[in-house]
């Protein structure tokens, strides 16, 4: 489990194919201290397990499913990535609960830049936006952000100077693709409402009251 608060921006050092997957080496910088084999690290929002350690370099096996569902399949030596070590239960939850299970990929539609913030609009499939709500949380390339707008075909966030300085998001341009993880609570609410509205009678006000939603 993670928080979406990026602790370091590292770089991919090597990538090699392993069947349908990849093995990537990432320079973790200061985050390598105390890391053990089997520990989890969020790399651009995808939870990966350390399978090799050499100084500040950590190797991760990226499964074929992860290659297909995330931007890690396009990672190359030199690619900058957002990094976060796993959350300790005694630590502060400064962002929001992030699993590191990427739900899909969104594409940047446009960026409006100003001195105090950037407003970034994304195109995204309904499978992602249906689990979003304005002022709710979303993880973009592993970064915990607040949604400023949601529509059927996309969503928007605002990036403040600190976020631009401490993450890779300042590197992005229109057309770039990023990993998206929607809010954990939103997923369960959506699934529950689907079950409530299925075959036997559909969704009713009485059912919503019984479930505590009304």
Image (spheres, rainbow, N blue to C red):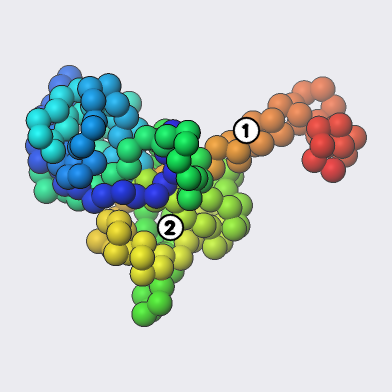
Q: In which quarter of the image is the C terminus?
A: top right
Task: Check if mark 1's residue and mark 2's residue have beta carbons within 8 Å.
Answer: no
The label shown at residue 138 is none
Residue 190 higher or lower than 93, as above or below: above
Say whether residue 103 is visible.
no
Mark with earlier residue (1, 2): 2
Q: Nearer the viewer, mark 1 or mark 2?
A: 1
Quickly name the residue at label 2. Answer: 122
Mark 1 burial class by Cα count in 10 Å: few <14, some 14-19, many 20+: few
Residue at point 37% right, 58% down? 108
Disc 1 and disc 2: Cα gap in Å? Answer: 23 Å
Q: Element under label 2? A: strand
Q: Residue at x 15, y 24 (%)?
A: 52
**Where residue 201 sits: x, y (%)?**
85, 27
Instruction: Give how far across and how far down residue 42 sits, in percent.
Output: 33, 38
Q: In this view, does 207 lie to the left or right of 127?
A: right
Task: Pick the quarter of the image with the N terminus.
Answer: top left
**Residue 174, above or below 127:** below
The location of residue 150, given as percent across then percent down, is 56, 57
User: In the rendered image, is residue 186 in sight?
Assistant: yes
Residue on which disc 1 sits: 188
- Provide the secondary structure element on which disc 1 rests: helix
In the rendering, at what x and y percent does residue 109 appear? 39, 62
């Amino acid at each position: 489990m993670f928080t979406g608060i990026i602790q370091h921006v590292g770089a991919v050092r090597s990538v090699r194919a392993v069947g349908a997957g990849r093995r990537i080496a990432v320079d973790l910088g200061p985050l390598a201290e105390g890391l053990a084999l089997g520990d989890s690290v969020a790399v651009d929002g995808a939870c990966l397990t350390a399978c090799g350690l050499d100084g500040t370099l950590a190797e991760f096996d990226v499964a074929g499913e992860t290659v297909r569902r995330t931007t890690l399949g396009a990672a190359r030596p030199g690619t900058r990535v957002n990094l976060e070590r796993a959350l300790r239960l005694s630590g502060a939850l400064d962002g929001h609960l992030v699993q590191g299970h990427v739900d899909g990929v969104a594409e940047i539609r446009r960026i409006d830049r100003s001195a105090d913030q950037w407003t970034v609009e994304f195109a995204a499939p309904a499978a992602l936006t249906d689990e979003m709500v304005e002022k709710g949380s979303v993880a973009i390339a592993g970064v915990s952000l607040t949604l400023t707008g949601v529509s059927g075909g996309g969503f928007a966030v605002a990036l403040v100077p600190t976020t631009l300085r401490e993450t890779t998001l300042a590197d992005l341009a229109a057309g770039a693709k990023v990993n998206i993880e929607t809010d954990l609570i939103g997923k369960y609410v959506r699934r529950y409402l689907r079950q409530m509205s299925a075959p036997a009678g559909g969704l009713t006000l009485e059912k919503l009251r019984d479930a505590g939603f009304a």
